[in-house]
Amino acid sequence: MEDFGLPELTSEQIEQLCTIAEEASRKHVHSRITKKDIEALDVCAEVEGARPVNLTVDVDIELSQSVKGFDVKTLADEAVNEAFRAAEDYLRGIACRSAK
């Protein structure tokens, strides 16, 4: 992740960052395909370090067999991108508050 002039993150902020990233990924997937068509959705967000912050997001999606012709890899990639966007917004907010 980019350094926005962040202070060292607390354990609570790191936990919140992971939660925000995971929720953004799930929200994106559910916006594109109904829950009943999803057999499995595993989202994992992990942070290494408190400064700099290294965020890793993995999204694994398994759709029901009734869903044909849907590009699951693209959907997973989009969900990861949404996670990073949401995480970046959160970190920018922390940087702005710490600059005051």
Image (tube, rainbow, N blue to C red):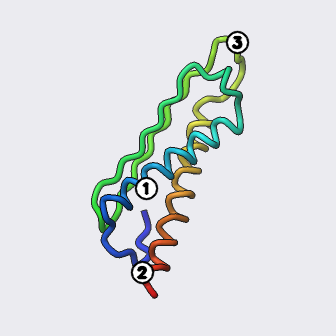
The span from disc 1 to disc 3 (Cα, nearest Å) is 36 Å
Question: Where 80 falls versus 75 (above or below)?
Answer: below
Q: Name the residue under label 2.
A: 98
Q: Which amino acid does label 2 sit on?
A: Ser
Q: Where is residue 19 in the image (x, y as percent from the top left)?
A: 46, 49
Q: Where is residue 13 in the image (x, y as percent from the top left)?
A: 38, 61
Question: Where 49 falls versus 81 (above or below)?
Answer: below
| Residue placed most toward the observer, 40 or 54 | 40
Q: Nearer the N terminus, badge 1 or badge 2? A: 1
Which SS class for mark 2?
A: helix
In the displayed image of the protein, which residue is found farthest to the front? 12
Q: Name the residue located 28 percent from the left edge and 60 percent from the top edge.
A: 49
Q: In which quarter of the image is the N terminus?
A: bottom left
Q: Name the residue under label 1.
A: 16
Q: Name the residue located 49 percent from the left edge and 36 percent from the top edge.
A: 59
Question: Where 29 falls versus 11 (above or below)?
Answer: above
| Residue placed most toward the observer, 36 or 79 | 36
Q: Nearer the N terminus, badge 3 or badge 2? A: 3
Q: How crowded is mark 2: few (under 14 residues within 10 Å), some or many (20 or more)?
A: few
Q: In this view, does 77 lie to the left or right of 48?
A: right
- Is the Cβ of the residue at disc 1 closer than 8 Å to that at disc 3? no
Q: Mark 3 points at which residue?
A: 66
The span from disc 3 to disc 2 (Cα, nearest Å) is 50 Å
Q: In which quarter of the image is residue 54?
A: bottom left
Q: Where is residue 8 in the image (x, y as percent from the top left)?
A: 30, 71
Q: Which amino acid does label 1 sit on?
A: Gln
Q: Residues within 10 Å of mark 1 (few under 14, many from 20)?
A: some
